[in-house]
Image (cartoon, grey):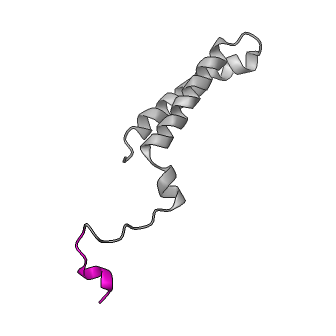
Amino acid sequence: MSRDANLPMSQAPMPRRGLIDRILRRGPLEAIATAIIAAGVVMLMQPLFLTLYTWSFATTLFGTVMFTIVSKVRE
């Protein structure tokens, strides 16, 4: 029997979280999605490059869909 099995839940050691578990949380992913949306809006408003303007809608749409999906992810 392990030593930790007899400890109450408040004193049991927390399981270590990996890098993937820390990244795949709502906060960082919402920030990335918001940055993608903002980049799409900036691409839409800039007057110099037609290629950026052409891809602005797709970028904004991708960020919006990502934000919608990420809002369903665990805290």
The image position of residue 37, as x and y in percent, is 55, 26
Q: Quadrant of residue 51?
A: top right
The image position of residue 31, as x and y in percent, is 51, 35
Q: Residue at point 66% right, 19% down?
A: 43
Q: Nearer the viewer, residue 44 or 13?
A: 13
The image position of residue 35, as x and y in percent, is 57, 30
Number of marks drawn:
0
- Image quadrant holding the N terminus, namely bottom left
Q: Is residue 52 placed above or below 67 in the rendered structure?
A: above
Q: Residue at point 53% right, 26% down?
A: 61
Q: Residue at point 44% right, 47% down?
A: 25
Is residue 58 rendered to the left or right of residue 72? right
Is residue 8 rendered to the left or right of residue 2? left
Q: Quadrant of residue 8?
A: bottom left
Q: Can I make out residue 58 in this image? A: no
Q: Nearer the viewer, residue 69 or 4?
A: 4
Please report the bounds of the magenta region as a residue range: 1-9
* Residue placed furthest toward the right: 48
Q: Nearer the viewer, residue 49 or 42?
A: 42
Q: Is residue 8 magenta?
A: yes
Q: Quadrant of residue 69?
A: top left
The image position of residue 29, as x and y in percent, is 49, 41
